[in-house]
Image (cartoon, grey):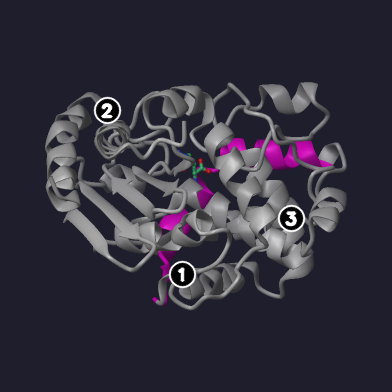
Amino acid sequence: MDIDDILEEAAEVARPAAEHGKVAGYIPEMAKLDPKSFGLVMCELDGTEHGVGDIDEPFAIQSMSKVFSLILAMQKLGTEHTVTDELWCRVGREPSGDPFNSLVQLEHEQGIPRNPMINAGALVVDDVLIDHCKDPDASMRELVRQLTGDEIEINPAIATSEGGASYRNRAMANLMADFGNLNHTVDEVLTTYNDQCATMMTARQLARSMRFLANDGIEPDSGEQILDAALARRVTAIMLTCGTYDAAGEFAFSVGLPCKSGVAGGIMAVAPDHSGLCVWSPPLDSSGNSLAGRAALHELTNRLELSIF
Ligand code: DON
């Protein structure tokens, strides 16, 4: 059976799971998403693309932006040594086992977030980016342009909606500022973060953007080394262990690939030496991950034997 047929079948098996999930309601603009939207796409390293459903409709990348901000911070810091000195002393690399916006560990652990994939960790990464980029959001757009060949935009209505509802993120930023783990103002860090979350991309663009992580840090079309191979491996390790929050164990078990989710219902994944993947279906489970998205990735990786395990 060819890959296109397998994608069609995975989509068919997965779509009904969306009925059991809920579209994110805590950001007003996200509540407007159509629960029936669904797209599944695979971009192979040789440039062959396979897709089914709404793969060219832009949606807010939300927490998937945390992968791009981590990549950007690693690029700016340059070497494993500098990343260790400037980043890993301020944010950990352990799964949190708690929801992505939990405040509990942060107080116990003196303002050092567990990892860069939860909200608190991404705020610290953004604080680092403000130190190293003239305009962190423009740098992220430029990174994504390099990875996809496309210009991408921020949706200002979503960024504003997010800003108006960011009570928890503001609380985390304040707590970290109190512990001395932010160099910039809470407002500056939150604005950078909210804009990144409101970046609009399609499932096809997101899948393309993951190919370099499946290819030792080299963007396969341009041949450009985006990240040193060792640093690229660190990113995928963190995606696998922390990218889907307190469901990361379940994702490793049922999907078996490094993944990163966002509350608009996107999940992007890396199949080493093979492809970048993305699935989009807005209804979420209680951990904030797309329900039908996980089901589709489960079907796909099982049928194509793509699991890294
Ligand atoms: O900060 C927030 O809560 C959202 N902008 C992003 C959270 C998110 O996408 C969690 N992912 N599944």
Question: Could you tell whether 279 is left or right of 63 in the image?
Answer: left
Along the viewing direction, whichever of 169 and 207 lies nearer the viewer: 207
Q: Earlier in the sequence, mark 3 or mark 1?
A: 3
Q: Nearer the viewer, mark 3 or mark 1?
A: 1
Query: Callout 2 environment at 10 Å: few (<14), some (14 to 19), or many (20+)?
Result: many
Within 10 Å of the Cα at label 1, are there few (<14), some (14-19), or many (20+) other Cα atoms? many
Identify the residue shown where x is 50% and y is 75%: 146
**Quick check: can you spot residue 36?**
no
The answer to whether residue 147 is above or below residue 15 is below
Q: Position of residue 66 (x, y in %)?
A: 56, 50
Circle 2 sits on which residue? 21
Is there a contact, CB below 8 Å, between mark 1 and mark 2? no
Type of secondary structure dominating the magenta stretch: helix
Q: Which residue is mark 3?
A: 127
Label 1, label 2: how many angstroms apart (C-alpha)? Answer: 36 Å
In percent of width and height, residue 91 lies at 75, 40
Residue type highlighted by circle 1: Pro
Q: Nearer the viewer, residue 221 or 91?
A: 221
Residue at the disc numbered 1: 220
